[in-house]
Image (cartoon, rainbow, N blue to C red):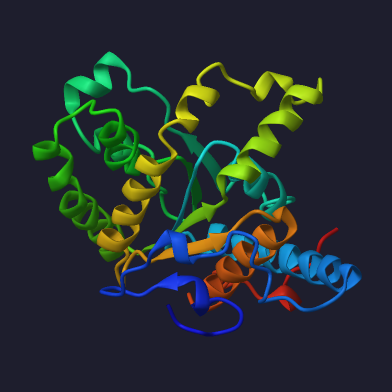
Amino acid sequence: MSKDLHTGRYRIEPGHEVRLSDVDPNDTSAFEGKDEDEQKESKKLNGKLRQLQEMLYAEHEQKVLVVLQAMDTGGKDGVINRVFQGVNPQGVRVAHFKEPTPEELDHGFLWREHKQVPGNGELTIFNRSHYEGVLIERVHKIVPESVWSHRYRQINDFERLLSEEDTTILKFYLHIDKDEQKKRLQQRLDDPSKRWKFSGEDLPERKFWKEYMKAYQDALNKTSTEWAPWYLISANHKWYRDLVVSRIIVKTMEKMNLHYPKTKLSPRSIRIE
C-alpha cells in the first residue's frame, strides 16, 4: 500500500497483495493531534462532505457508491451515522443487503445490487454488498468453490461497468480484531439501548473468524482495481476509523470536479416584489 499520510496508505493498489495478519487494527498513526484537533478536523470534514454532496445532487451528472464491509460489530452503522451526519437525505441513500429473497435467488448473482446502484446526483451507501457472495456464501459453503471462485471476475466487471457510467466507487473494509469484537458484543449485552443489535448468530459466527479473514483477504486482493479500489481501515478505534473514512471520501469527491449547474438567469435582472 502507498504511504501517503492521509489516504493512500490505506488504499490497496491493484496487484499488491495484503495480509490481514500484518495490519494492526489498533493503528492510529495517520493522526498525531490531540482530542480537540480530531474533533475540529472531523467537524470540518463533515461540513465539506455536506457541501460536496449538495453539489453532486445539484449537478445531477455523476454518482458515488460507497461500499462498507466488516465483521459483525466492525462499525458499518457507526460510519453511516457519523461520517454522513447532516448530509441532505434527498441525495443520499443506504442500501442494506440481508438474506436474499426467493425472487432475488431466482435472478441470481448481482441482480439485486444492480437495482440499488446510485442514479445521477446520488450518493449510495451499500451496508454490506455484493461481496457477501464471496464471503458468507464461501465460508458457509452455501455455494461451491466452482461458483464463488468466478465471482471475483464478475464483481470486477460489474464495478467497471458502473465506473464507465460515471460512478465513483469507494470500498472500505473496516478491520477489527477478534478481541475488539468480543468487547463490542459484550457492550451490546450490557447496554439496554444497544441490546436489540445483539443476534443469536453473532457467537456461532465467531467460530469462523479464520475462515472469514481468509475470505476477506482474497476479496481485497482480487477486487481492488483502479476503477474500484479497496481501502483497508484500521477500525478498533471508532474515532480514527471515522476520521480516515471521511478524509478519503472528501479527498476523492474533491477530485470529481463537481460544480453547481449554470443558469441563464441574471440575478440583477430579477426584481422580487
Left or right of 30 on screen, residue 205: left
Q: Residue at x 47, y 59 (%)?
A: 60
The location of residue 246, given as percent across then percent down, is: 64, 64
Q: Where does residue 49 sit, x and y in percent of width and height?
A: 66, 64
Q: Is residue 175 above or below residue 78?
A: below
Q: Position of residue 5 (x, y in %)?
A: 60, 83
Query: Which residue sits at x=72%, y=76%?
Result: 31
Give the mark count. 0
Is residue 216 shown above or below 107?
below
Q: Residue at x 68, y 69 (%)?
A: 28
Quadrant housing the N terminus: bottom left
Whether residue 28 can be seen here: yes
Please name the residue shown 46% across and 66% down the image: 22
Considering depth in this image, is 260 or 79 the residue closer to the camera?
Answer: 79
Residue 63 appears anywhere in the view: no
**Residue 263, percent from left and from top:** 56, 71
Q: Looking at the image, which residue sits at the far left? A: 146
In the rendered image, which quarter contains the C terminus?
Answer: bottom right
Residue 13 in the figure: left or right of residue 89:
left
The outermost residue toward the right is 36
Q: Nearer the viewer, residue 199 or 115?
A: 199
Between 243 and 236, the residue placed more toward the observer is: 236
Q: Nearer the viewer, residue 248 or 231?
A: 231
Left or right of residue 154: residue 82: right
